[in-house]
Amino acid sequence: MPWWTAPWAGLPCTTEKQIDMARNKSGKLAETKEMANILEAPEHLRGQWAAHFANPAPLVLELACGHGYYTLALARRNPLGNYMGIDIKGARLWKGGKIALAENLHNVRFMRCRIEMINKYFAPSEVDEIWITFPDPQPKKDNNRLTHPFFLEKYRQMLKPGGVVHLKTDNTPLFEFTLGAIAGMGIKPGAMTRNLYKSKLYEDEMLQVSTHYEEMFVADGAQIKYLNFRL
């Protein structure tokens, strides 16, 4: 595509660097459509994920996964499980998909979709666990928080009885909001800490996985909060 016909051309104050970044993003999005481990809103697989993975093992989701580093780390630690990272930004999923292919991680998939539409892609009781790691805290729109009751009800529908939701965040308002949200639904927290690195919970190797953002937050002196609960 000639740059002057591309969607980013003609924007006010468009710099050469911005054009290169937009072209790179466009190229990654196009490539994700050809990658077998990145799926675009696959409604036809609802209720069929075990067959798709060719593995009846538990299905674990990471929501708003970004580049998918946590999804990849979980999959490496448990090659017998099925793991899926979900995000709306395909250019980010491209990175995780590439790493999974390079490492032959056959138990990993990525899906591009809006999380508010997630029930279109997973049948009731089809998911075993959900991880929400360092989501956007949405300080001005709490109804967009991924632990708002609107979303929790959606997770409840697709989780198996006793299915677990994990939250890791550096953001205190989001953490306290989540505690209030689950209390309002009559749900008691399971394991919980407001300082993960100083907690015995940190002995769990699944909680020792550290994302790029987590490392940045810790370097800035933030305390990492962790909470899990069953819907």
Image: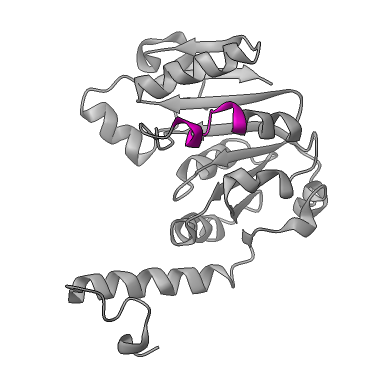
**x%, y% of residue 175?**
43, 20
**x%, y% of residue 55?**
79, 46
User: Is 196 situated above or below 31?
Assistant: above
Relative to residue 20, is residue 150 drawn left or right? right
**x%, y% of residue 22?**
33, 71
**x%, y% of residue 51?**
83, 52
User: Is 83 situated above or below 91?
Assistant: above
The answer to if 146 sits in the magenta stretch is yes
* Observer-nearest of 35 and 43: 43
Give the residues drawn in magenta, as a range: 142-150
Query: Which residue is drawn at the image coordinates 44% and 69% (left, top)?
Result: 28
The answer to if 50 sits in the magenta stretch is no
User: Is 189 situated above or below 213?
Assistant: above
The quadrant of the picture occupied by the N terminus is bottom left
- Image quadrant where residue 148 sits: top right
Relative to residue 62, is residue 10 drawn left or right? left
* Observer-nearest of 65 and 107: 65
The quadrant of the picture occupied by the C terminus is top right
* Observer-nearest of 155 and 59: 155
Query: Which residue is drawn at the image coordinates 60% and 44% (left, top)?
Result: 116
Query: Which residue is drawn at the image coordinates 34% and 75% (left, top)?
Result: 23
